[in-house]
Image (cartoon, rainbow, N blue to C red):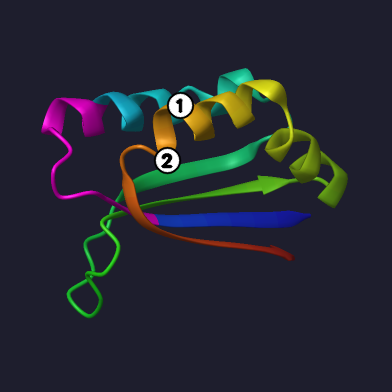
Amino acid sequence: MIKHILLFRFREDVPAETAAAVLAELETFPGRYPAMRNWASGPNISTRDTSMTHGFVVEFDSEQDLLDYLHSPSHEEFVRLRWRPVIERQAIVSFPC
């Protein structure tokens, strides 16, 4: 099992409706990528570290399933056209569990 975690912050100049649309699209990922397991996402409610505003965590059965997702044409297109233009910072961690 591979746990994949993404923490991120929208750019300050991104309109709220644009951020909401990106978040809504992320929520469709488990239905679009059947290898995803145990998807959870939401806003950062930590009072200790507010450097990231949102995050998600998902599991994959294998590292190959994760790589297939990351390198899929639809994921690559989402990252290039929808994600990079609106994200200021991100941290990604994937590890076996």
Residue at (34% x, 47% y) in the render? 87
Q: Is residue 10 above or below residue 49?
A: above
* Circle count: 2
Spot occupied by residue 2 in the image (x, y as percentages of width and height): 74, 56
* Vertical order, 20 against 12 (above or below): above
Name the residue rendered at 83%, 51% in the picture.
Answer: 63
Disc 2 vs disc 1: Cβ atoms closer than 8 Å?
yes
- The residue most toward the bottom is 48
Q: Quadrant of residue 72?
A: top right
Is residue 19 inside the magenta stretch? yes
Name the image quarter holding residue 47.
bottom left
**87 to the left or right of 31:** left
What's the residue at 79%, 35% (across, down)? 68
Q: Quadrant of the N terminus?
A: bottom right
Q: Which residues are magenta?
A: 8-20
Q: Which residue is mark 2?
A: 84
Q: Label 1: which residue?
A: 81
- Camera-nearest residue between 72 and 40: 72
Residue 66 in picture, x, y percent from top left: 75, 44
Q: Is residue 82 magenta?
A: no
Q: Given the image, on which type of amino acid does mark 2 rest? A: Arg
Which residue is at a point 24% across and 34% down the rendered structure image?
19
